[in-house]
Image: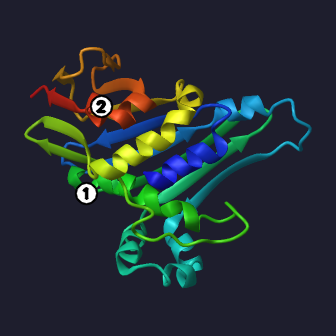
Amino acid sequence: MKNLLLLLFGILCLTSCQFTETLVLNEDGTGRMSLEMDMGEMMAFGAGMDSAAVKMDTLIAMKDVLREKKDSIATLPVDEQKRLKAMENYMLRMNMDTEKGVMLISMFTDFTDISEADKLMKGLEGSGNFLPDMGSTTTTTSSEESKDVLGVSYSYKKGKFKRDAYIKDKEAHQQQLDSMSQAESFMSSMKYTLKYTFPKKIKKASAEDATYSLDGKTITLERSFLDYFKDPDVLDLEVELEK
């Protein structure tokens, strides 16, 4: 989460970024989790600048990145190496079209059990320093520097789904809140959206302001990114499916 915030402060202070956490859950508990960052507003901000048009749609396998950066990874603490090793099955997609104002970055992974889904969020903390063409040099990050302050747990049993977000390190969380305070005005329009699709029609959900697809299987819930970071409970969600 800290590396994610550093990314935001580095390139998004003049505009905003929208996050969408997407889950597709199958009947047997398998599925796919993805996190997408829409930076289209940043593209719109730079539309008037004199620069060459860029169009790309690239899919990157994290196992290839880890192999390419193996020497740098070897210098990290053992815990960091294990965390990155766990990302081997992740995929990263970068879609950019400057003429159309499109800039989407998404990371996704398939899981065999919903409890594994939180690994996607954990993996984001360590991915930034090892992506190709994201900087002129490769740096390493200690476990203390990349300490994540928010956690998310997921469960799905007998037709009942639960998402529970929580603060993992209150002291580090407060430090990041203090760091963010000066940039709140720039980040006020940032949103964090949940879009979850289930194998059966939704019977009821804990979020009163959620919206639903026509078939009743997909629920969408949106919150301010700042509100979510300050109090992760605002995106806690419980869903019960029809039998």
Q: Which class describes the residues within 10 Å of circle 1: few (<14), some (14-19), or many (20+)? A: few
Residue type beneath disc 2? Leu
Give percent across and percent down for residue 165: 26, 41
Q: Which residue is drawn at 45% across and 56% down?
A: 124
- Relative vertical location of residue 82 with respect to residue 134 in this rendering, above or below: below
What quarter of the picture does the C terminus occupy? top left
Q: Quadrant of residue 68?
A: bottom right
On the rendered structure, is 9 left or right of 174? Answer: right
2 or 1: tag closer to the N-terminus: 1
On the rendered structure, is 111 left or right of 115? Answer: right
Q: Which residue is drawn at 22% across and 45% down?
A: 154
- Mark 2 highlights which residue? 235
User: What is the spatial separation of the Cα atoms under label 2 and label 1, in whole angstroms?
Assistant: 24 Å
Q: Nearer the viewer, residue 191 or 13?
A: 13
Q: Nearer the viewer, mark 2 or mark 1?
A: 2
| Residue 18 seen in render | no
Secondary structure of the residue carrying tag 1 is loop
Q: What colouring does the structure picture have?
A: rainbow
Q: Nearer the viewer, residue 44 or 77?
A: 77
Secondary structure of the residue carrying tag 2 is helix
Give percent across and percent down for residue 144: 40, 66
On the rendered structure, is 13 left or right of 80? Answer: right
Give percent across and percent down for residue 37: 54, 40
Numbered tag placed on residue 59 in the rendering: none
- Mark 1 highlights which residue? 112
Q: Quadrant of residue 15?
A: top right
Q: Nearer the viewer, residue 122 or 242?
A: 122
Q: Which residue is drawn at 37% across and 80% down?
A: 78
Residue reaching furthest right?
50
Q: Which class describes the residues within 10 Å of circle 2: few (<14), some (14-19), or many (20+)? A: many
Give percent across and percent down for residue 188: 52, 25
Residue type beneath disc 1? Thr
